[in-house]
Amino acid sequence: MMRTRFAPPLNAHLSVGNARIALANFLLARRLGGRITLRLDDLDREHARPELIDAIVADLRWLGIECDDIIRQSDGVDRYADAIEYLKQAGRLYPCFESREELRAKREQRRKRGEATTYDRAMLRLTSSQRAAAESSGKRPYWRFRLSDDEAVWDDMVLGRRSVKLSAVSDPVVIGTDAAPLPALTAVIDDLTVGVTELVRNESQMTATGVALDLISALRGGRLNLRLAHLPPLIDAGESRIARRVDARTLRSVRRDGVEPRALASYIARLGTALPIEPLPMARLAETFEIAAFPAEPLCFEAAEMLALNRRVLCETAFAAVSDRLPSGATEAFWLAVRGNLDLLSEARGWWDVVAGTIVPPEIEERDLLMTALELLPPEPWHGGVWQDWTTAVARATGRKDGSLAEPLRLALTGEDRGPELCDLLPLIGRARTANRLQVAAG
């Protein structure tokens, strides 16, 4: 069966960049009728924070990604041990005793001589007596995987033919001094165990992909059944609060801003492709997903385009779907009045202050107009046509056309020069607030 996987870093909340990779793997699996596995690298004691696991799973579900299987590396100790023993017997693992300080000094010396700073494999020349002496002095070895001298080559589904010259890469450390297997090795073993057949990664992981392919070859005797795709990064456009450092922003911060999951998923699933960017349910995104449609160049994340898409989603969203995220006391009438004017759901807070709170409008020069409007303010209760009735009366009394009244009255009542229709807002604002704001604006 076709299978993809996603392995989020467990040292931070899920970022937009990582969510994009998760989404691409998820849509690819659904498009091809396959499955997606969520891999939790909880053996990485230096970087993993197990308390983040529930938060990451929740963030994925918020975006609309439901993984078919979850595997924890902490459950795979036996399979790692078997693979490690196999690689040792095959002569592909070798023990090392050099400290970080020693390695740093060697790299600096090679750099000064103008030589490559890749690891020099000095520990491959370690004799049995030297190893015994090191261990008897209290040193514990870590283990490196000896890379082949070939090139790792693959036909990338996005970037085309790609290769990594393994002789230019340092042999990776795959087992720590505590004998625990490290991610460079465990990730490959897990992919082989669950049967990953397609995999979407970040372009920044190209070298790691070359190492992984060499490990797969060592473990499977050269047999390879894995199709790869690497997505170029998202490039920030401008200084918008949405676009700034977009790859690194957490999904929950974007969520707090008021971005809807359908808008974000639709945007990053189609950005850079020839398909129109429109708010679509996840099933439709999967039906039309083509990994090969992504360009090989970095993609520009346009905040304005993203916000316009989010506005379309909000405009179509029913009150019941957002009621628990609106300010306390917000009604369906309020939501229907303002939803078409929101780029972000968080902006509803400002409009709730307009209709139910206290705002201080600017002083407006047209004092006579405002005082006339105040005198003609109809008594409550107010119905849906109160705006039209009121402005018609004011226009008649002042000799002005109805259209010329909207701008100064809107500014006086809302403090803004644009926004939701006043015929919808005025009944929500109510007579007392309206009268007070007209007086304040008149000075």
Image (cartoon, helix red, strand yellow):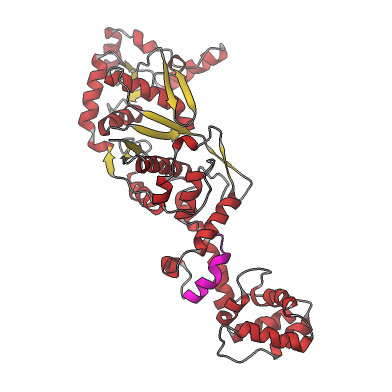
Residue at point 50%, 71% (across, down): 335
Q: Is residue 191 above or below residue 442?
A: above
What secondary structure characterizes most of the magenta part? helix
Residue interval drawn in magenta: 331-343
Residue 289's quadrant in the figure? Answer: top left
Q: What x and y, as percent, mark residue 162?
A: 47, 23
In-image side of 114 versus 362 (left or right): left
* Residue 410 vs residue 148, the one in the foreground: 410
The image quarter in which residue 23 lies: top left
In the image, 2 versus 58, the foreground residue is 2
- Where residue 20 appears, x then y in whole percent? 45, 43
| Residue 278 to residue 419: above or below | above
Query: Would residue 330 be visible to someone looking at this image?
Result: no
Residue 203: % across, % down? 48, 31
Residue 341 part of the magenta-drawn span: yes
Residue 21 seen anywhere in this rendered image of the structure: yes
Residue 262 in magenta stretch? no
Left or right relative to 372: residue 254: left
- The quarter of the rendered structure image containing the N terminus is top left
The quadrant in which residue 92 appears is top left
